[in-house]
Amino acid sequence: MTKHVYTFGAGQAEGKADMKNLLGGKGANLAEMNLIGVPVPAGFTITTEVCTAYNKLGKDAVIDMLKAEVEKAIADTEVAMNAKFGTKGEAFPLMLSVRSGARVSMPGMMNTVLNLGMNDDAVKILAEKSGNEQFAYDSYRRFIQMYGDVVMGVEAEEGEHDPFEEVLDRVKDEKGYKTDAEIPAEDYKAIVEEFKAIVKEKAGKDFPTNPWDQLWGAVCAVFDSWNTPRAILYRQKEQIPEEWGTAVNVQAMVYGNMGETSGTGVCFSRDAATGENLFNGEYLINAQGEDVVAGVRTPQEITLIGSRRWAERNGTSEEVRKATFPSLEEAMPEVYAELNDIQQKLENHYKDMQDMEFTIQDGKLWMLQTRNGKRTGAAMVKMAVDMLEEGMIDEKTALLRQEPNKLDELLHPVFDKEAIASATVLSKGLPASPGAATGICAFSADRAVELAEKGNKVILVRRETSPEDLAGMYAAEGILTERGGMTSHAAVVARGMGKCCVSSAAGITVTMTSMKIGSKEYKEGDFISLNGSTGEVYDGEVATITPSLDGDFGKVMQWAENNTRMYVRTNADSPADAETAREFGAKGIGLCRTEHMFFEGDRIWKMREMILANDVEGRKAALAKLLPIQREDFYGILKAMDGFGVTIRLLDPPLHEFTPNDEASQKEMAEKLGVSFEEVKEKVEGLHEFNPMLGHRGCRLGNTYPEITETQARAIIEAACDLKKEGLDPKPEIMVPLIGTVKEFKIQEEIIRSVATEVMAEKGVEVDYMVGTMIEIPRAALTANEVAEAAEFFSFGTNDLTQMTFGYSRDDAAKFLPIYIEKGILKQDPFEALDQTGVGQLVEIAAERGRSVRSDLKLGICGEHGGEPSSVEFCHRTGLDYVSCSPFRVPIARVAAAQANLK
């Protein structure tokens, strides 16, 4: 019989760490912690396979399938914890926590439900057995609030605050309580009844009192959460397959809110923001786990060094700090010592930075979970370098541990020092996720998305964030919160996304529509800036600069160099871009788009003069004016990439793109070029095409107007000859675009080689050059064996190849692609990540057939996919020589290429 439920507890476990695919990351690690002697409350994990069955068979069938196994698992948990589920006599009641747990950490999943099993009878027994009535009824109201929200769907109406929080705020205001912990049992009893009434009103049914009904409701809610919009969004962004599913972790409750000898916290074995080898985290006395991550109370630092750093940031004296903000190391030294030993044990065991949750119940430490911690790009690099140097991991592991896209964080701007010196500091909060961000305020996730879609840079400003804000966090440049600590939802998720975040900003009050800082009010559209490395919030926009790359980054790039087969080029149209890419390690240019050069300054007018010409002589005369300009451009680019190949694509776009469409601009063109308006208008109308993407462009231009190809070939070879005379080593590769037949290519090749021979004779110097083509039309891929008889290299233009294979217009597909992805028609946008089964098959066919004719055929890819990690891995498997991408994605592609080789 297939096993669906795996138990753990009392040092025993049916699972282990390498069962992550079946038990989810959280469940596998709970089992593993039991096996290595870490104190973990007993419980059980329902497998990810059940989630898949749930989505196919439905709720009732899955409950029937699980019932016997879950009942046995509950009985085992009762024995391990010496407690009883439900109100069985006078035994200490077993309460449960229910959490989701996918293979990888997913911030968009369901919030945890704590204290499950609580009802009017159980709360009385808990109060009696614990001797703490306030704790018991606080736990009861928490359970109703969490279960009502997460399982029963009780939530705030549009523009309103959480109805449960409104009750708590009202009671505290009326009675003068500053925190939830100050509310006495009698008031909590009344609050419990109000909470039940809210559930009845909002959900349309009574709050369930049967513990088994509560458990099945929570388990099914976890499975339902796998397909919520925010979970789907996260899977799409992180490329997590839908079929993975989530596990459910059910675990005995231990209580951090039983009084002053109890508490809860989150900790990291190293600094998740900087990578520093420093144990750190936050805790709260007399609190439950959600108090830390939800930002309801400002937590305290675990370590003494962390607490002193906090005091230094906030200008707090040592005396005040010790009295009001003691570290766990000071408040509970024995518990801290045990926790410190455990975090080191776990890091040594997993050989990676650990993100841990713990609860202290009446002085006893319990570990609730551990996982490999999310980290910023900078921390990822530093930790890998440090752990390699410490002997904890080898170079292969250190390199495979890099998330290529996270390196992007290290390549983007930071605040300019001069600009920051004159900026007005509005507030200072916790530096929750490093980096710099500037943008207009948005006070809801939906508005952040809407404003970002209109091209605005946005700062999401919230009281605190929750999983519902995920889309807005993705859309924003940075996140600012009124409440929360370094381990709040906003902080952890922002670090995982590589977004700048400042949490618990001092002196700010956030509503649904505005933010007040002192007497100043900021509304939607007002600019602010955030420094996630210092916690400072600035008024208005602050200028940024490109960061310098430190030594650790260089070490990662060296690891990539040591372990790669496929090298990386860049797409660059100017010497400046080429130089930037070379600094990042690019070995040549995979795509230089010559048409981009024609749009600079007055060049467009010379191009338009050529277009207006009525005969070959007129076009040649105009092209003669463009020749020295092109030669100068090619000289600079070839020089910047001295010694490396530079693939230069001949003119590709249709000529109408160089002419104006509006009447005023056409009149300006006529006047500037000394022709009549009617002549310009007639020419523009004559260039009009119904489907220009498939029209008179690419090699079709060169074959109908060979003088264009002649001019460009001359400019390229002349530039190369001049550099060769200067002692440099230029390597031009002239690429013919958009061929569908070998004959199209051969006509262009003959022109290029004839011109090259002529120029080299004139210059008295020989240069090595190649002539090849871009494979971007399916027919060219299918007849690659014919094309390779003439072409010396193929560069796969996967942007157009994707368009033509799918029949999707890249410019218009945004109207329907999100819907296609939402409905599961496509798993991801084929213009972002290469469609390996369809478009990829054409690449494989072309590569195989091309090399069957020419074994030394050089193969590369120059579409946007050249910088996307999963596409880079495909290119490696297919045997391509290189990938080419934009300059700032070169490091990403280099790491992805090396990882592909190691895998």
Image (tube, rainbow, N blue to C red):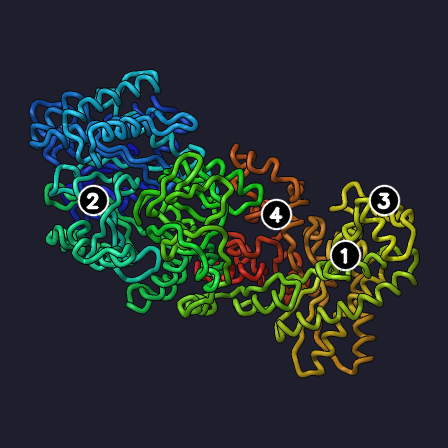
Per the rendering, the mark at residue 284 is 2
Tell me the amino acid under the disc marked 2. Leu
Q: Which residue is mark 1?
A: 742
Q: Is residue 526 above or below residue 568?
A: above
Measured as percent of width and height from the top left, residue 820 is found at 56, 35
Residue under the point 42% across and 49% down: 497
Tell me the amino acid under the disc marked 3. Glu
Measured as percent of width and height from the top left, residue 880 is found at 58, 60
Pair 4/3: label in front = 3
- Could you tell which of marks 1 and 4 lies nearer the N-terminus? 1
Left of 163 or right of it: where is 845? right
**Within-10-Å neighbours for mark 2: few <14, some 14–19, many 20+:** many
Which structural element holds mark 4? helix
- Could you tell which of marks 3 and 2 lies nearer the N-terminus? 2
Q: Quadrant of residue 271?
A: bottom left
Question: Considering depth in this image, is 900 or 662 the residue closer to the camera?
Answer: 662
Measured as percent of width and height from the top left, residue 903 is found at 44, 58
Which structural element holds mark 1? helix
| Camera sees residue 371 | yes
Which structural element holds mark 2? strand
Question: Considering depth in this image, is 294 or 718 the residue closer to the camera?
Answer: 294
Tell me the amino acid under the disc marked 1. Val
Tell me the amino acid under the disc marked 4. Val
Q: Which residue is mark 3?
A: 685
**Within-10-Å neighbours for mark 3: few <14, some 14–19, many 20+:** few
**Within-10-Å neighbours for mark 4: few <14, some 14–19, many 20+:** some
Measured as percent of width and height from the top left, residue 192 is found at 22, 23
How far apart marks 1 and 4 lie (CA) works out to: 21 Å
Q: Is residue 844 above or below residue 556?
A: above
Q: Which residue is mark 4?
A: 839
- Could you tell which of marks 4 and 3 lies nearer the N-terminus? 3
Question: CB of mark 1 within 8 Å of CB of mark 3?
Answer: no
